Image (tube, rainbow, N blue to C red):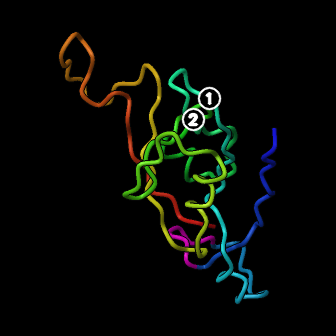
Amino acid sequence: GMYKAAPLPRVESSATATPVSSRRSSTNVSRSNRPTGVGLMLMQNATPEGGYEVYVDSIQNQAASEQGVCVGDVVRWVDSRDVTNQRAFEVRSLLIGNAGSQVQLTLQRAGLCICGTPGKGGVCRCHGMFEVILTRQ
């Protein structure tokens, strides 16, 4: 495809929620202010309706994995912005920000139900949507 994800810089940030006791990095503190992402590689599929669906292609963020993010999850919202039918590069740009800042993602996974509440026609109310909050690293 046209879009090649740039490799993410590995920045040890002291602003992360869980302190890393054994590894202290005092080098280049100013680097933490440079824009960075959340360690998710995104790809897009064309939808039958003629739009796009952006999904997680690979995960390089342990916190994302711990919160249940899986390869194949579709990105529906970034913070309060609906990203339905946006392309991967557009969604990726919304994930970029200062290291240590947080972003809330609403993801959707086919066949997942976290609400346990059948709605009309047996379709659950959550539609397989769930939210995670990730820290840019």
Q: Residue furthest front?
A: 50
Between 57 and 116, which is closer to the camera in this rendering? Answer: 57
Give, as a single range, the part of the protein colored magenta. Answer: 15-20
Q: Main secondary structure of the magenta part?
A: loop
Q: Is residue 118 above or below residue 135?
A: above
SS class of the residue under badge 1? strand
**Which quarter of the rendered picture does the C terminus lie within?**
bottom right
Q: Quadrant of residue 130?
A: top left
Report the amino acid beneath label 2: Tyr
x, y (%) of residue 85?
51, 39
Marks 2 and 1 close (CB-CB < 8 Å):
yes
Q: Count all numbered tags in the image, as a single digit.
A: 2
Between 26 and 29, which is closer to the camera in this rendering? Answer: 29
- Residue at x 64% of width, y 62% of height: 37
Q: In the rendering, which numbered label is found on residue 4?
A: none
x, y (%) of residue 90?
60, 54
Residue position marked by numbered label 2 in the rendering: 52
Residue position marked by numbered label 1 in the rendering: 46
Between 1 and 115, which is closer to the camera in this rendering? Answer: 1
x, y (%) of residue 107?
46, 40
